[in-house]
Image: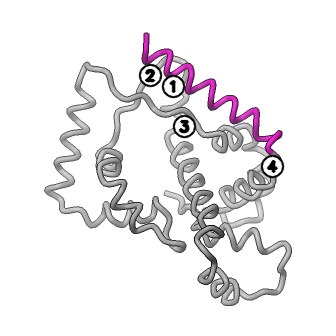
Amino acid sequence: MSKTPTAFALWRQSQAATRKGVSDAALEAEWAKLAPASYKPWLAAAMSCLSFCQAVQVKGSAVAAEGRGAVATPTPYALWLEANREKIEAEVTQEEVFGQVAGRMWKQVDPAEKQKWVQEARDLASSPGPQKAKPPATPYNLWCAANRDRIMELAADEPKATGFSLVASKLWGSLSQEDRQPFIDQTEKQKEAQEARDLA
């Protein structure tokens, strides 16, 4: 699995163009002194990168399900994550984003407890009853999908594991509200369509 960038990595990348020659050590020291209001947007951006990477990994399933009201069966990890979201969020820091904290904590879960989540996922997969539909794509993820080729081209010289996410988050951050609005509208339409299906 490709490693998603940390909040610090995204912030450092944003500084690179205007502050050439500044050492990584100096940037790390500056990052450590940032107030929460300054670093929280970068935490959010890193979480968006993680969400996009997860969406890409399940692209085949998502494409097959699109437009048919299909639902995805949650994995044991996803079930555990949802049940422990508050605990995970409490451990998120500037250096370790939500996905990284969740992955670390999941690895530490006792095998017997993991088996409980495996069984629950199996039960949901075999259940004929309705399951929770996958939430609509975020505006950021829709924009990334629409601009994938351009982002890949610009990320050609970046590290393979993180290049796409770094370039995508930087470009998204530079977009005006007017440029973002079509993707925001698409997300709203998806939400409305999902609500209509749920009521049907």
Residue visible at 23% across and 24% down? 127
| Chain-order first, disc 2 or disc 1 | 1
Give the amino acid type for the residue marked by disc 3 in the picture.
Answer: Lys
Q: Quadrant of residue 88?
A: bottom left
| Chain-order first, disc 1 or disc 4 | 1
Residues at discs 2 and 1 in contact (Cβ within 8 Å): yes
| Chain-order first, disc 4 or disc 2 | 2
Q: CA gap, disc 2 to disc 1?
A: 8 Å
Q: CA gap, disc 1 to disc 4?
A: 30 Å
On the rendered structure, is 129 left or right of 36? left
Q: Residues within 10 Å of mark 1 (few under 14, many from 20)?
A: few
> On residue 175, which mark appears?
4
Residue 172 point in image, percent of width and height: 74, 51
| Depicted 62 relative to depicted 10: above or below | above
**SS state under label 1:** helix
| Chain-order first, disc 3 or disc 1 | 3
Check if residue 192 falls in the magenta segment. Answer: yes
Residue visible at 30% across and 64% down? 107
Give the amino acid type for the residue marked by disc 2 in the picture.
Answer: Ala
Q: CA gap, disc 4 to disc 2?
A: 32 Å
> On residue 165, which mark appears?
none
Residue visible at 55% across and 56% down? 47
Q: Main secondary structure of the magenta part?
A: helix
Give the amino acid type for the residue marked by disc 4 in the picture.
Answer: Leu
On the rendered structure, is 75 left or right of 178? left
Residue 108 point in image, percent of width and height: 27, 67
Q: Which residue is mark 1?
A: 64
> On residue 59, which mark appears?
3
Q: Quadrant of residue 111?
A: bottom left
